[in-house]
Image: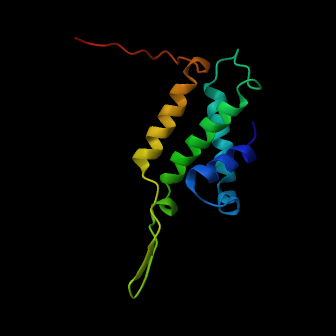
Amino acid sequence: MDASQVLQQFAVLAGISQEDAQPFAPMARLCVARLYARLREDTDVDTNEEALCTVAAGMLLYQYTMTAQADTQSSFKLGDLSISAQAISRADAKALCDELLASIAPLLKYDDAFLVQVG
């Protein structure tokens, strides 16, 4: 998995062009590195490449929504014609990122965390 693959999927998720996604290449590399750091040592990256790439793209989408650039909503009005672009909500991006990470949970380290249901 490399950052260019992540950028391609990110552009689709974010609804932006490949060209507009290019400034996020350093952030894509960071998301890939963060994901690799969370993987168990016995994870077969080649076998799971597509899923891992999608998860990294979801992580990047969430980071993208945290930037001021993603929060700006542009609109244009001329007479009765109104065109506006909706920004991706942080909550939706976070939910997607969490869902994607959950989908590869067996591949991730436990990091000494555990969940307990009370009552």
Q: Image quadrant for the N terminus?
A: top right
| Quarter of the view holding residue 58 | top right
Horizontal and vertical percent position of residue 55: 60, 35
Horizontal and vertical percent position of residue 34: 62, 34
Q: What residue appears at the point 51 percent right and 38 percent down from the top-left corner?
A: 97
Q: Nearer the viewer, residue 106 or 40?
A: 106
Q: What residue appears at the point 62 percent right and 32 percent down from the top-left corner?
A: 35
Q: Image quadrant for the C terminus?
A: top left
Horizontal and vertical percent position of residue 117: 31, 13
- Reply above or below: 30 against 105: below
Looking at the image, residue 67 sits to the left or right of residue 56; the answer is left
Q: What residue appears at the point 46 percent right and 60 percent down from the top-left corner?
A: 87
Looking at the image, residue 62 sits to the left or right of residue 90; the answer is right
Residue sitting at the far bottom: 79
| Quarter of the view holding residue 37 | top right
- Reply above or below: 99 against 8: above
Looking at the image, residue 113 sits to the left or right of residue 106; the answer is left
- Reply above or below: 56 against 61: above
Number of numbered callouts drawn: 0
Horizontal and vertical percent position of residue 20: 65, 62
Residue sitting at the far left: 119
Q: What residue appears at the point 56 percent right and 41 percent down from the top-left corner?
A: 59
